[in-house]
Amino acid sequence: MKTFEQLVAEALRDVEEIFPCDLMSELEFDGPAPLLLDVREPAEYQAAHIEGALHVPRGVLEPASEYGFEETEPALAEGREEDIVVICRSGRRSALAVRTLKELGFLRVRNLKLGIRGWNDDGGPLVDHAGNAVDPDRAEVVIENPAAP
């Protein structure tokens, strides 16, 4: 039997990662931006996420990646050759998601190293469910506890 940490360690050996600061630089260029795929739970995403990120909770990743399912997300199902960066809170769930996407035939998928925490620590902007900017100090609280008032 393997632990969660062992599964993550195995996944991290096989996945490409990108630091938040490097992703910010990529997003500033005029070229095609990668698809940002946030695999956190709904409350986490609603509290604070990177603007424009597609939300597909980890629990429905596989059916969201293919047509013919209630959870199908066309942008993802059509993205097997697109550049995708997967995001979670710390970079661990997303590492598992990257490994799964690679097994499903996605060719250019990377993990956001340090996750949304690292993004916020590097000064990356975040928005809430209504598209309002999230104060970076407040983001630190809601990233850890999305139900915080």
Image (spheres, grey):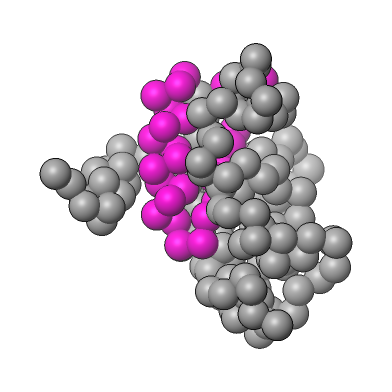
Magenta stretch encompasses residue 18: no
Residue 2 visible from this viewpoint? yes
Residue in view at x 43 percent, y 51 percent? 93
From the viewer's side, name the closer residue of 26 and 87.
Answer: 87
Of 139 and 82, the residue lying toward us: 139
* Residue 16 position in % (x across, y down): 41, 42
The residue drawn where x is 72% and y is 24% is 74
Q: Is residue 81 visible?
A: no
Q: Which stretch did the figure color magenta?
A: 78-105
Quarter of the rendering containing residue 70:
top right
**Left or right of residue 4: residue 42:** right
Task: Indicate the position of residue 11 as horizontal and vertical percent values.
Answer: 31, 42
Farthest top residue?
Answer: 68
Look at the picture and state if 118 lies above or below 81: below
Compared to 52, does 121 lie above or below?
below
Q: Position of residue 33 (x, y in %)?
A: 71, 40
Measured as percent of width and height from the top left, residue 128 is found at 77, 65
Seen in the picture, residue 108 relative to 133 is either above or below; the reply is above
Left or right of residue 62, residue 102 in this image: left
Q: Residue at x 55, y 36 (%)?
A: 60
The quarter in which the N terminus is drawn is: top left
Quadrant, the C terminus: bottom right
Q: Residue at x 26, y 46 (%)?
A: 7
Residue 130, by quadrant, is bottom right
Of residues 130 and 134, the one drawn nearer to the viewer in this rendering: 130
